[in-house]
Image (cartoon, rainbow, N blue to C red):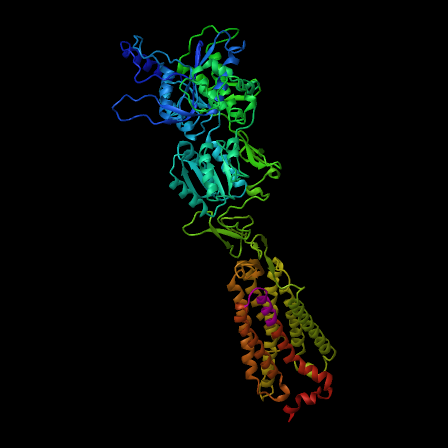
Amino acid sequence: MESLFTILHVIMAIMNFSGANETCTLQGESAYPQLFKEGDIIVGGIFPFHSAWESPDLSYLDKPHLLKCWSLDFRAFQYSQSLIFAIEEINNSSLLLPGVSLGYTIYDTCSSILMGIKVAMALINGNEQTDFSKSCSKPAQVQAIMGETYSSASMAVAKSVGPFSIPIISHYSTCTCLSDKQKYPSFLRTIPSDYYQSRALAEMVKYFGWTWIGAIRRDDDYGNSGMAAFTEVAEQLGICLEYSLPFYKTYSQEKILRIIQEIKSSTSRVIVGFLDDWDLEVLLPMFSEHNVTGYQWVGTEAWISDPVLVAQDEHNILQGAIGLSIPQNTVTGLKDFIMDIYPLKKAGSAIFTEFWEALFTCKYKTQNDTEDVQVCTGKEKLSDIKNTFTDMSQMPIFANVYKGVYAVAHTLHNVLGCTQTCPTKKQPDPLTFLEHLKRVHFKTKDGEEVYFDNNGDPAAKYEIINWQTSREQKHEFVTVGFYDSTFPAQNRLTINMASFVWAQNSNQVPVSVCSESCPPGTRKAVQKGKPACCFDCIPCAEGEISNVTDSIKCEQCDEDYWSNPHRDECVKKEIEYLSYEETMGILLMSVSIIGAFMTVIIAIIFFIHKYTPIVKANNSELSFLLLFSLGLCFLCSLTFIGQPSGWSCVLRHTVFGITFVLCISCVLGKTIVVLMAFRATLPGSNVMKWFGPPQQRLSVLAFTLIQVVICIFWLIMSPPFPFKNLKRYKEKIILECHLGSAVGFWAVLGYIGLLALLCFVLAFLARKLPDNFNEAKFITFSMLIFCAVWITFIPAYVSSPGKFTVAVEIFAILASSFGLLFCIFFPKCYIIILRPEKNTKKQIMGKIIV
């Protein structure tokens, strides 16, 4: 910063040297102040005392004269009174700038940008018409300039005086663009920037759920810049503008009618007005004429609390409007000072006459007056009238002028090094003063903090105002909330919903959306060719949910969860396995137990009758071993029922494989015994000695050990394990036993099938033995059933879904087991129990003896 000061001082020194021999001459006509007071240091002011002017002659044949202004604006006089009050208060203070008097020079801009630039230059350079020998680099005549009121004028003035480092402090210019210190290095303001107002308006619109709105903006820097900032924030918050229409008070009727037509043809019910009170004074009669009513208006501080506008809104077009207003604050003594109009006469008698005539609607009599008008007596009283000047609703803006003057005074106090008294009355260097002014921080006598941020803006604080009509049909501005930019983002906006009255005196918040909100369970899909706020609601796909309103996408549920029917919640997937509690599980368990019980009964019968010929003739040892293995086959099916676990998965497949091999080995042994017994009855045959009981036991053990070895290898390589099958069904989890090594599983089944096939072939070869040795036929039939069951099992096992896969496997085990039990043992039990007369050696050996 110090290096910047040094560079600027060098540049100014060069300019002083180059202009040392030049003289300054004022070009054109002089502009004279409306209000003036001498002082050691002068504070300038530029306010629009008139709201209109007559266009000058620009024929270039004559020298153009100053603008001829008309239509007094009483607000400018109130601003001037605020400036004068602050200076008088400072001059009478012994604590601030002791020994230094402040003066003021206040000009009228006639609401003209060109005139604003001209009077700003007059404040800096002076009004002398004559040449003088002083260098043109003389100090500015004012220390700072208070004004301008409107943003466009402030931009022009700030850009003109910026190179001279003369501070310009505005009380009412809110355009965001003025925060650009590259373009406007000396501009400061005591009113918040539209950057915060635009953001506050967008947040407020979002708060009420209005996502589809229209907008009308003032067609100048204030309106265009403010609406651009609002649109940017609105888009971030998911708000869409159906239209954004420019307007200026000089627009033709044809243009205004197009605006009205656009509004009436729209579907949005909320209008954001980035306008000022003058714009709405033009629009309201047109809206009333064309019945543009029933809309919810959202306004800026430029018009939302204007009582004049309320009085003109005869058809309640703006009824229920809400918007932002500068917070109400008081400056002790300011209201009384403004109402005391005689300081104006003392400061500027020329304009005072015009002011008095406009204020009291009278005219001072002159010799040339022939009109029959009320004559001013000079003794009229403010208490007898009610107009804009007597309205104090703009007190926060008056306070802004007051704070600006005090900011200048406090900065001077610091720069001049004042303590008990100020050691010098010399006007400080503009650049030095400006840099100190940017860093000033003080409290007013009423306790309000005043300071500027890096952009020369104050902290943004707003009241939220609602237009309401009382029971006495009087319009009221009701404060219904607050916005404070110094708070964290989530706490800036505070609204009391119970206090609102909406458009057309409704108690319900208006609805303004392009599409109704998408409920939970759906997502938004933007309609082709339309803004993002126009959308269709698409139901979430299976397995996806949205649990908030207006979700832009559906979230995938975790793999253990699934969407509920409404698609708004992920619920735990249904877990499916063949349990003992369900009907199918109970049925299969019952059949398994019945089969095992029948096996035990048959074993008991055989044990009781073990010495009878039919038991002895059918190899009782293998029969008991077969019954034991069949009992295990029936019971092993129980391991397939229930929730799979590590031990049950290993047990069900290995026990099943080993017990079935043991069973088939016994059947195979019995088949070989039958064949050998038949061969042994032939003359000279001694084959039975090669397949006696020891060999039978050994063969059964050998066949079974092979299966045991296969199972051991299976368990070593990749054993079965519990597994959540998430792929077969999306909406539920199948708990099953993963095979681990598929090779091991099919090797176990293949070995069983190989033994069953061998047994079937041998039994088939023995089918023509004598009838008394018909066990071979029964074995053949049982093996036929066994093989048929397991051949059909394979495709059924592969294609069955979920728990039915296990059910098919259990059914195959039970069916093949019952087939062996019925075919091999039931005929014998029939003879033992019901036909004991046939259970004799003679009956068994009869055919052979014959």
Q: Residue at x 42, y 49 (%)?
A: 530
User: Residue 476, percent across and down?
Assistant: 58, 33
Relative depth, front residue between 366 and 532: 366
Magenta region includes residue 802: yes
Region of the chain picked out in magenta, as a range: 800-812
Q: Main structural element of the magenta stretch: helix, strand or loop?
A: helix
Relative depth, front residue between 162 and 736: 162
- 570 w.r.t. 663: above or below: above
Q: Residue at x 43, y 30 (%)?
A: 175
User: Residue 417, percent across and down?
Assistant: 48, 9
User: Residue 423, percent across and down?
Assistant: 47, 5
Q: Residue at x 27, y 12 (%)?
A: 18
Relative depth, front residue between 471 and 570: 471
Say left or right for 162 vs 805. Answer: left
- 732 w.r.t. 269: above or below: below
Relative depth, front residue between 81 and 291: 291
- 810 w.r.t. 422: above or below: below
Picture quarter containing residue 365?
top left
User: Residue 571, percent across and down?
Assistant: 59, 54
